Image (cartoon, grey):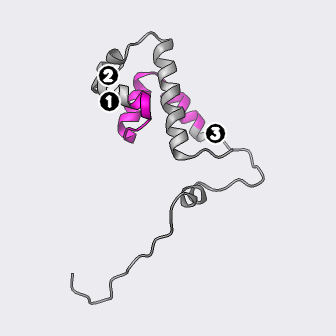
Amino acid sequence: MLISGPKLTSLMAAACKVKRQAIGLRQIDLATRCGLSELTITRFERTGQVGLGVFARIVVALGMSESLVEALNAEASPRTGSRTVEEFLRAGQKRQRVRLRRIGAKI
């Protein structure tokens, strides 16, 4: 099953929120552990929209880093119709023309 980018970020944010609540942390407590603002944690849990570095800090602070690495390294079982990561990422993008500079052209 392929999941879209926005759906994936939403699922990751929800999983982090559930973990935070399960270990009894308030958003401000998690923010302090991560060295982030409470607003960043609130925005992440609501929208899933944060940079990769911020996401990594949250995952580490929640003690989820090993699980995430294991999930990323898990060998995917071959399925009919499965695509490579590159194909998946390309599917969501519009084709774009690229203009190459001519050799000897001034910058």
Distance from Cα at disc 2 to Cα at disc 3: 30 Å
Residue 96 placement, left or right of 103: right
The C terminus - image quarter = bottom left
Element carrying mark 1: helix
Circles 2 and 1, Cβ within 8 Å, touching? The answer is yes
In the image, residue 69 sits, relative to residue 25, either above or below, namely below
- Majority secondary structure in the magenta region: helix
Element carrying mark 3: loop
Q: Earlier in the sequence, mark 2 or mark 1?
A: 2
**Which residue has dot 2 on it?**
31
Amino acid found under the numbered disc labelled 2:
Ala
| Disc nearest the viewer among 2 and 3 | 2
65 is within the stretch colored magenta = yes
Circles 1 and 3, Cβ within 8 Å, touching? The answer is no
Residue farthest toward the top in the current orientation of the protein: 24
Q: Quadrant of residue 37?
A: top left
Residue 55 placement, left or right of 1: left
Question: How many numbered marks, from 0 up?
Answer: 3
Q: Percent position (x, y) of residue 93?
A: 51, 61
In the image, residue 49 sits, relative to residue 45, either above or below, namely below
Distance from Cα at disc 1 to Cα at disc 3: 30 Å
Range shown magenta:
44-71
Q: Which mark is residue 74?
A: 3
Q: Earlier in the sequence, mark 2 or mark 3?
A: 2
**Which residue has dot 1 on it?**
40
| Disc nearest the viewer among 2 and 1 | 1
Q: Which mark is residue 76?
A: none
